């Protein structure tokens, strides 16, 4: 293994610790919201490096001017201002022509759509992304810790009208909803499938809660551009019930969704989202057009804790080095020099050669070849320099094309290489 291949192996190992993710939050301007978003971002960058994460915010209530302006200008790449729900705004940003020159698929490995009441400052980020990749799924979510009263069990909404009412209200954190006392306890609950299973590293599922789903870049175009009647204009209920099956059909993925049990986050359950009758209409619209994809909520398997995580794929191998240049052809053989002519008898002083011609004659006589032939030899030998080994290696390395891999993977290689220390000395270093 040469020095260049050795460095590639080291970088492949470091890729398990690197991640490149877009963090997307739907936010208000409450100081508690601002503090939580700041803390989460600082934590992610502390673990993954400054280049790990970009931030986009959707201000469904309030404006960017109500945030810390120094922090905002430094950290927020793009924002949206105005009413609307998380996935509809995410869709509008993804399809914005401004990003046509730099599609998200090139910039990010994952896009994480978060509610503002999620706290991941206790999460092992390296392990989280390691398990996300190991699952082979394109839509993953952490499991959730928090108030023990947050769990509920809902499944198919048509089971009966009573369960349907409770289930629909349990799918989103709500506030200021005119509901009865019996319903108030259920209003902020999420499906019990999101509770960490102590036996599993992760579980493949038919459903992923819309509180904090993370989408792999390979599924973005399918869900945010191609999926019609999937995200309502005024509400978003129903989207989380069909996107797993839709990704399975569109990408040919057997297990497109997963809950990561080993890496839970804290769900603070702030009850800040507001719900209206548009949500039930949205759910009905999604089911009307995607009845075959509308999921029955269940876990498909359990990958036991302690199962070795597969190693990540190695970076693309460099192309083979070009064959060495053939040695330069030897200069053509020179004809034998003619025997020197006998020197004539010394001429009278008036007939002596001029000094410059005498000097040239002396030089030609010392080399025994005509001066123009000597110039040709000098020209040939001065233009046949062979590249030294280090230059040849540098030239070969320059041929490695990074355009064949997404830009976010190049960024991860760069991110990993900063923490890679090795004392190996390459031939060029020597």
Image (cartoon, rainbow, N blue to C red):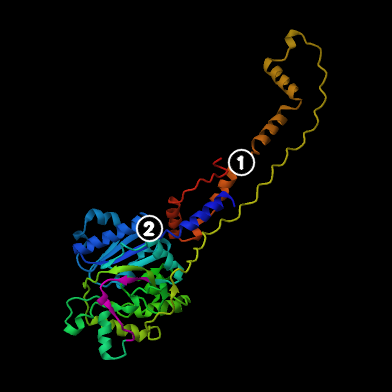
At 68% from the left and 36% from the top, the residue drawn is 380
Above or below residue 127? Residue 245 is below
Circle 2 residues within 10 Å: few <14, some 14–19, many ≥20: many
Q: Residue at x 81, y 16 (%)?
A: 343
Image quadrant in which you'd find residue 93: bottom left
Answer with left or right where residue 29 lies relative to residue 242. Answer: left
Q: Is residue 373 above or below residue 137?
A: above
| Residue drawn at (66%, 39%) of the image | 384
> Going by the image, does 305 lie left or right of 150?
right
- Is 143 inside the magenta-drawn segment? yes
Residue to which mark 1 is pinned: 388
Classify mark 1: helix, strand or loop. Answer: loop
Which stretch did the figure color magenta?
A: 141-156
Residue that carries the numbered disc 2 in the rendered image? 52
Q: Position of residue 92 (x, y in %)?
A: 32, 69
Question: Image point 28% across, 83% down: which residue?
Answer: 167
Q: Nearer the viewer, mark 1 or mark 2?
A: 2
Q: Earlier in the sequence, mark 1 or mark 2?
A: 2
Left or right: where 93 falls relative to 406: left
Q: Tag 2, which secondary structure?
A: loop
- In this rendered view, identify the residue nearer to me: 41 or 84: 41
Give me the C-alpha separation between circle 1 and circle 2.
39 Å
Residue 336 vs 299, above or below: the answer is above
Q: Out of 31 and 392, give the one closest to the viewer.
A: 31
Q: Is residue 22 visible?
A: yes
Report the residue that reaches farthest toward the top. 349
Give coordinates of residue 254: x percent, y percent.
47, 77
Q: Quadrant of the C terminus?
A: top right
**Any magenta on residue 214?**
no
């Amino acid at each position: 293994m040469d020095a260049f291949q050795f460095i590639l192996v080291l970088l492949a190992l470091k890729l398990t610790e690197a991640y490149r993710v877009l963090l997307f939050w739907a936010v208000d301007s409450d100081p508690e919201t601002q503090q939580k978003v700041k803390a989460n971002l600082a934590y992610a960058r502390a673990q993954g490096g400054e280049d790990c994460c970009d931030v986009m915010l959707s201000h469904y209530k309030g404006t960017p001017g109500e945030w810390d302006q120094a922090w905002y200008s430094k950290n927020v790449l793009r924002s949206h201002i105005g009413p609307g729900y998380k996935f509809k705004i995410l869709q509008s940003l993804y399809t914005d022509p401004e990003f046509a020159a730099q599609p998200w698929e090139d910039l990010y490995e994952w896009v994480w759509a978060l509610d503002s009441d999620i706290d991941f400052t206790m999460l092992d980020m390296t392990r989280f992304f390691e398990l996300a990749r190991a699952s082979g799924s394109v839509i993953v979510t952490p499991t959730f810790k928090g108030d023990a009263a947050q769990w509920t069990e809902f499944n198919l909404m048509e089971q009966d009208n009573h369960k349907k009412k409770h289930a629909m209200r349990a799918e989103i954190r709500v506030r200021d909803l005119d509901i009865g006392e019996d319903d108030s306890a259920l209003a902020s609950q999420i499906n019990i499938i999101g509770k960490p299973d102590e036996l599993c590293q992760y579980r493949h599922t038919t459903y992923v809660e819309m509180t904090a789903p993370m989408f792999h870049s390979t599924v973005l175009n399918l869900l945010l551009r191609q999926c019609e009647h999937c995200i309502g204009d005024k509400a978003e209920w129903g989207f989380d019930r069909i996107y797993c099956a839709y990704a399975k059909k569109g990408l040919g993925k057997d297990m497109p969704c997963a809950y990561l049990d080993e890496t839970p986050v804290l769900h603070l359950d702030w009850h800040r989202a507001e719900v209206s009758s548009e949500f039930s209409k949205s759910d009905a619209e999604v089911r009307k057009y995607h009845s075959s994809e509308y999921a029955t909520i269940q876990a498909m398997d359990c990958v036991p804790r302690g199962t070795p995580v597969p190693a990540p794929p190695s970076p693309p191998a460099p192309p083979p080095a070009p064959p060495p240049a053939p040695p330069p052809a030897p200069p053509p053989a020179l004809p034998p020099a003619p025997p020197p002519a006998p020197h004539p008898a010394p001429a009278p002083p008036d007939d002596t050669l001029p000094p410059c011609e005498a000097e040239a004659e002396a030089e030609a006589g010392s080399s025994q070849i005509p001066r123009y032939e000597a110039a040709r030899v000098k020209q040939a030998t001065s233009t046949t320099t062979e590249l030294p080994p280090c230059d040849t290696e540098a030239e070969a390395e320059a041929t490695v094309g990074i355009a064949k891999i997404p830009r976010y993977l190049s960024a991860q290689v760069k991110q990993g290489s900063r923490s890679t220390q090795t004392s190996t000395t390459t031939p060029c270093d020597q």
